[in-house]
Amino acid sequence: MTLRIIVMAIFSVVILSAGLLGMRRAKSFDDFMLGGRSVGPWLTAFTYATTYFSAVLFIGFAGKIGWGFGYSALWISVFNALVGVLGVWFLLGPKIRIVSHETGINTLPEYFEWRYNSQGLKLFSAICIFVFLVPYTAAVFMGLSYLFQATYNLSYTTALLFMGGFTALYLMMGGYRSMILIDFVFALIMIVGVIVLGWSVMAKGGGLAVMTAGLNAVNPKLTAPVGPPGWWPLFSLCFLTSVAPFAMPQLVQKFYAIKDERSIKTGMVISTLFSLLIAVVAYFVGAVARLFLNAADNPNAFKDGKPIFDALIPELFVRVLPEGLTIVMLLLILAASMSTLASLVLISSSSIAKDLYAGFINKNTSDKTLTTLMRVLSGLFVLLAVVLAYLEPSTIVAIIGVSWGAIGSAFLGAFVWGLYSKKMNMTGAWASALLGLGICVALYIKGMPSPEAGTIGMMVSFVMAPVGSLVGGK
């Protein structure tokens, strides 16, 4: 336990030092929000990937999806890397950078206002971002708290309050500059962590062949190309987690800040390889977790004989890894989550400060006031997310499905078609946003699992954008 405390103390000092350094350099709103639009390829690549993957991947998705789908969950990791990372960088990266640098746009709602000449779309998108990213941030806090609960024997509430306070302090200090300064360190920790995790699980399980035979003995479908839940749930998860990034504001933001097109080409390769490594190891570990855990020996991960999906991977870390390696895993997930939290808080705070306050309430607000408001709202946003996480509303996978599905359904068609087609108009944008989001939420309320509801909503959004524009005329 002493070693764990020492490591966490060192980690905390490093994070807070980055926060102080970022605070000194964040002299304007543009610095606080986008790092002065001068971020290079390596930092952008790592901050994109670490924002994409967080405690949500390792704790929620690896636990529930890996356990239920077996080896077929690896399809999700492949689609995430090739579509959600490589596809976004290749298809959208250059266009987003050009538009944002030429127009001075800082946020996705500002893009919608500029592209469609509609303050209504700006208001609608700002509200969507704030409403649906709060649950996402709460899910990240839930994942971290479950990990601290298993590693340090802290109560869930104590762990949640500790992480919330620490995160609020760090984020309110330096904004995007602090985030990119530390993300390189985070990325290195994640690379070392997943290599250690993969190697340890393979060694403990007796090798790939032995573990495959073990899964096959439990259920042959766990080693089949399509796992037990079937092709539609698997396709929905691949689609949701890989296509939603084309319109997720915290990921789009990275291309506002990158300095030139050459950096995009370099960053695309780095980010794709990094993401493939992280996702493959995470889902593989989740798939073989049932070989190491059971209700009799691991009561913290099961209730009435049924697995508590969000607690499976933290329990696996404690049961399978020596103490020193458990600390590495703790740092791995902390590193991934801190970057994700920073991006979510910045984007959500900007939706209120820049898009609502400066866009509608006080259009003549000063840069200094706007930056101060961003810091205050960052703390308030963290507080809201902590309160929601305390209520433990659902499994992490369900929360993420709702958040990503709703944001993707609202923004996908209007954003992607708006970048690529001059024929897109305000009618098409509103049709895709309202119908996509409405169908997504309606299906979820009626009981459809969130990944499936989000997938259908995003498909509707993408189709309705050009259809609505055609009906609306020039």
Image: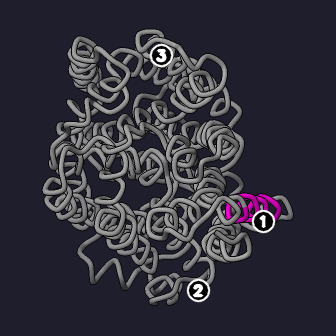
Q: Which dot marks residue 270?
A: none
Q: Nearer the viewer, residue 386 or 313?
A: 386
- Please name the residue that numbered disc 1 is placed on: 439
Q: How crowded is mark 1: few (under 14 residues within 10 Å), some or many (20 or more)?
A: many
Secondary structure under badge 1? helix
What amino acid is at disc 3? Answer: Leu
Magenta stretch, overall SS: helix
* Residue 139 visible in the picture: yes
The residue sitting at 36% across, 63% down in the picture is 92
Q: Which comes before the other along the chain, label 1 or label 3?
A: 3
Q: Which comes before the other along the chain, label 2 or label 1?
A: 2
Image coloring type: one colour
Q: Residues within 10 Å of mark 3 (few under 14, many from 20)?
A: some
Secondary structure under badge 2? helix
- Please name the residue that numbered disc 2 is placed on: 231
Magenta residues, start to end: 431-443
Q: What is the quadrant of residue 160 in the picture?
A: top right
Q: On the rendered structure, is 55 left or right of 199?
A: right
Q: On the rendered structure, is 304 left or right of 241?
A: right
Q: On the rendered structure, is 85 left or right of 190?
A: right
Q: Pick the quarter of the image with the C terminus.
A: bottom right
Q: Which of 472 and 41 is in front in this view?
A: 472
Q: Which of 67 and 122 is in front in this view?
A: 122
Q: Position of residue 203 (x, y in %)?
A: 21, 65
Q: Residue furthest right?
A: 446
Q: Where is residue 73 in the image (x, y as percent from the top left)?
A: 45, 74
Instruction: Give the CA distance from mark 2 to mark 1.
Output: 22 Å
- Mark in the foreground, 2 or 3: 3
Q: Which comes before the other along the chain, label 2 or label 3?
A: 2
The residue sitting at 32% across, 19% down in the picture is 174
Q: Which dot marks residue 370?
A: 3
Q: Magenta includes 435?
A: yes
